[in-house]
Image (tube, coloured by chain):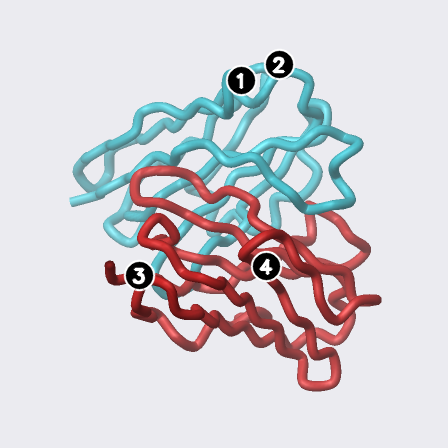
Amino acid sequence: DQQVKQNSPSLSVQEGRISILNCDYTNSMFDYFLWYKKYPAEGPTFLISISSIKDKNEDGRFTVFLNKSAKHLSLHIVPSQPGDSAVYFCAATFQTGANNLFFGTGTRLTVIP
Amino acid sequence: DAGVIQSPRHEVTEMGQEVTLRCKPISGHDYLFWYRQTMMRGLELLIYFNNNVPIDDSGMPEDRFSAKMPNASFSTLKIQPSEPRDSAVYFCASIPGRGRDTGELFFGEGSRLTVL
């Protein structure tokens, strides 16, 4: 069973607007969360992460929010740019181990110029 | 710096044939991971190595799958015999030992396997 779920397979947003990608998890032991971005014909690349001791982490246009009580995290992209069009994977781990990384199924973001 | 290098990028084969996927991790990285990406399950960990030693292969779906890492710069994932349900994109990723705690993997570009 998927311990990390991304229920929206796709999302379309106008350039300049906010993109919000959502992720839910079931394992309360997860203590570190990551977002990866994947362009076609390329491997995923690390984008941003957050520890469970925080509820927000910001890096430029990208902000990740964590709601532990709801077991939910979201990635906000503001403003969205056409170059942000990609598949975004949410991932979670516990004991902050790369060998315990659980990925969601991904959300394809399309930013419309 | 060279990233993780995978070959072949695309492989089309017939059911029953042997498939070998190859990976060269980033030099100096102590951990190597093999993942499989499917639409239904996203990215799934198949097996990972630490200092060339397989540590956890619980994600390998069946005995038809095997992986080796004969040295620090080379790993293979073999499927024998292949089946249509093995069709997926297979990713190799590596990470330095000091980065293990962060989960920030460096992925290759993937090998897209199609089994007819």
- Within 10 Å of disc 1 (Cα), the crowding (few <14, some 14-19, many 20+) is some
Instruction: Tell which subunit mark 4 falls on.
Output: A
The residue singled out by tag 1 in the image is B74
Disc 1/disc 2 C-alpha distance (Å): 6 Å
Disc 3/disc 2 C-alpha distance (Å): 43 Å
Instruction: Tell which subunit mark 2 falls on.
Output: B
The picture's colour for chain A is red
| Residue in the image at 36% along x and 53% along y | A86
Circle nearer the N terminus (4, 3): 4
The residue singled out by tag 4 in the image is A91
Q: Amino acid at mark 2?
A: Asn
Indicate left or right for B27 with B83 as reference. right
Disc 1/disc 3 C-alpha distance (Å): 38 Å
Q: Amino acid at mark 1?
A: Phe
Q: Are marks 1 and 2 in contact (CB under 8 Å)?
A: yes
Instruction: Tell which subunit mark 3 falls on.
Output: A
The residue singled out by tag 2 in the image is B71
Q: Are marks 4 and 1 in contact (CB under 8 Å)?
A: no
| Residue in the image at 59% along x and 16% along y | B70
| Residue in the image at 56% along x and 56% along y | A35
The picture's colour for chain B is cyan
- Within 10 Å of disc 3 (Cα), the crowding (few <14, some 14-19, many 20+) is many
Q: In the picture, which quadrant includes the N terminus of chain B? A: top right
